[in-house]
Amino acid sequence: MGAASESLPFGGSWTVPGTQPYGNLWFFLDQQLQSRNIQVLYGTPAMGLVQNPNTIEILGVQANPSGGTTINVAAKKGVILCTGGYEYNAQMVRDFIGIPNVKFFGSPYDTGDGISMAESVGAALWHMDVYAAPTGWSAATPPYQASSQLGMPSKGGYIIVGADSKRFINETQSPGPNTAPSPGTTVALVAGKYLSHGQYVTPPYPQPIHLIFDSVGFGAGGLFGSGPGGMGWIYTVEGYKPDPTNKTELANGWITSASTLAALAAAIGKDQTVLPAEVNNWNAMVAGGADTEFGRTTGLTAISTPPYYAIQLLPLCYNTQGGPVRNSNAQVLDHKGNPIPRLYSAGEMGEVFSYLYQCCRNVSACFTMGRIAATSASNLMSWE
């Protein structure tokens, strides 16, 4: 209370000073924990909630120390769930997001455990289909768990084709089709959807989707993200360093190459007649000076210098927003809208955002609801 809020240019007073190569805010918060002698048990994941069967109060958690047996940890006043989203729970992603093979920037430890624990004690769920937000393309990058953001070739021609080996979007707009006021302008995304005929709908993902380009694009610079210090778990934690020549990614099998378009089509499972014809059609439009199919106005360059290359594109998102329903006191609610006693939640797990894209507000929401949850729980009388 009493704090002022104002919108400042990016990089202004929002910046947390520090000396770390990334995550200065996280390191700042970690220092606050250490200065207060607050113990964090990173090797003791919570497995479930302990609930009084008569009063339905939440009394603590069940946890499983690494290499040990399940233990019960009592909470004198309450439990606050702040376990993040479900980005790396394949079943939840399949059930709730509905986009096959979607990839994420963030922590592989966001596996939806808190959502399952809340469900087990009668919590209602909301916003489970809301995620933030298709932000471009990634690719399968084993052995890394998290994903990198792909860039388009800075030189040379390129197109994106779907399962039928044909273009389906303006490649300079991600990820929706050309529904902008004028060709080449950006389509605003709202909760991972784009505006089409007055309604927000999920973008098309006719998978498998492939980026097709030639040797000019291959040699024009790294395609697999910004590297160390860039945004994303794969860079900052897993230590992936993109090769600016793309040769390492080619050797890893993340990029496919062939001397002819027909051979490239065969290698990636595309139609050996349709894909070359689609490239020829693109080259013809380039020669005519206009993309008459999707209105693309930039990168009008022919794909004509072998060898030819392909990368299978996968939708890339930031995080999920769904989880247990909470009220303004951060209390977790049951299916009748009643608070489950002594259970609270904070963070992106069950965030309030529904049909509006949260637009970088997850961090401020973590601070806000975390403070409310902690205040609410600490004001309770101990159940012991």
Image (cartoon, rainbow, N blue to C red):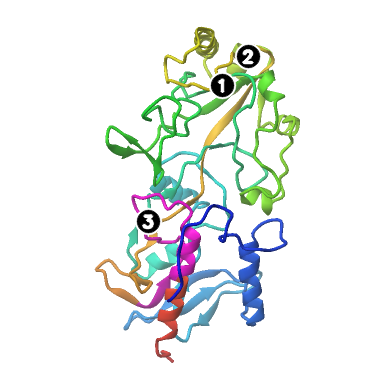
Comparing 349 with 181, the one in front is: 181
Q: Which residue is mark 1?
A: 299
Q: Look at 72% across and 62% down and name the residue there.
A: 19
Tell me residue 174's x, y (percent): 47, 34
Tell me residue 318's x, y (percent): 51, 49
Q: Look at 53% across and 81% down and name the residue there.
A: 73
The answer to the question of whether label 1 and label 2 lie on touching residues, with beta carbons closer than 8 A, is: no
Secondary structure of the residue carrying numbered label 3? loop
Task: Note whether 380 is above or below 278 in the view shown.
Answer: below
Secondary structure of the residue carrying numbered label 2? helix
**Few, some or many C-alpha atoms within 10 Å of disc 1 (few <14, some 14-19, many ≥20)?**
some
Q: Which residues are magenta?
A: 341-369
Task: Note whether 123 is above or below 302 in the view shown.
Answer: below
Q: Which residue is mark 3?
A: 353
Q: Amino acid at mark 1?
A: Gly
Residue 201 is left or right of residue 290, and the answer is left
Secondary structure of the residue carrying numbered label 1? loop
Residue 190 is left or right of residue 69, and the answer is left
